[in-house]
Image (cartoon, helix red, strand yellow):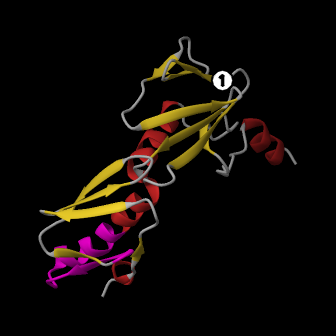
Amino acid sequence: MSKIGEKLIIVENGVTVTIEDGKARVKGNVGELVISFPHGIDIIQKERTIQVKRNSHGRKTRSMHGLIRTLLSNAVIGVVKPWEKRLHVVGTGYRVKLQGADLVFDIGYSHQVIFKKVDDISFVVEGSNKIVVRGIDKQKVGEVAMKIKKIKKPDVYKGKGIRYEGEQLKLRPGKKAKTAGAAK
């Protein structure tokens, strides 16, 4: 049995969950999400809890059990308090700014890089080098943050680029360090 799939989801006040025709509609004060689930999965709703059960023991149904429970739990949390990912733009002269709803990066290229606004996702720029990506869908927030990070991946020698807040990079020694060690 799936350990994650068996956990109950506690629905907070202000959140309504409606289950109909293979879809769960989660509505809160921040927004609304719809999660579809496959045929072998049943969602049982009681007063303030939701339980995800499977009605067959097929391989696909077993693998979807924990996933559907996690997606539902993330939706219940996200419609009350939006998910967020924080990114840092690291490097001399590297900066980011908001232009309307789009992000504009100066990151060492001969031109500015513009990252267009994504539906249901909001951007906040703190200072000139910190970005906060917010939204009610955890999966979409992570996907957008990864696309932003791919604009300029951190350099393995100097660490310059876009990275997650708190991300630790293992920097490689440069050519000087290698030749200095060999001369001894």
Q: Residue at x 74, y 24 (%)?
A: 92
Q: Is residue 7 left or right of residue 149?
A: left
Which quadrant is the N terminus positioned in? bottom left
In the image, farthest residue toward the top: 110
- Relative depth, front residue between 166 and 157: 166
Q: Which of 94 and 170 is in front in this view?
A: 94
Quarter of the image for residue 161 reads top right
The kind of residue tagged 1 is Arg
Q: How many labels does the image show?
A: 1
Q: What element carries label 1?
A: strand
**Disc 1: which residue:** 95
Considering every residue shown, the one lying at the far bottom of the view is 1
Q: Is residue 164 above or below residue 77?
A: above
Q: Residue at x 31, y 68 (%)?
A: 67
Residue pictured at 51% horizontal, 53% vertical: 81
Residue 25 at x, y percent in the picture: 26, 57
Left or right: residue 183 compared with residue 152: right
Residue range highlighted in magenta = 47-69
Residue 84 horizontal/vertical position (percent): 54, 47
| Residue occupying image coordinates x 53% and y 33% | 123
As displayed, is residue 20 above or below residue 117?
A: below
Name the residue nearer the viewer: 162 or 117. 117
> Label 1 crowding class (10 Å Cα cut-off): few <14, some 14-19, many 20+?
some
Q: Position of residue 35 (x, y in %)?
A: 26, 57
Q: Does the magenta stretch include residue 62?
A: yes
Asked where in the image residue 53 lies, by quadrant, the reply is: bottom left
Q: In this rendering, is residue 48 above or below 184?
A: below
Q: Is residue 78 visible?
A: yes
Residue that lies at the very extreme toward the right in this rendered image: 184
28 left or right, relative to 126 = left
Pinpoint residue 108: horizontal percent, then vertical percent: 61, 20
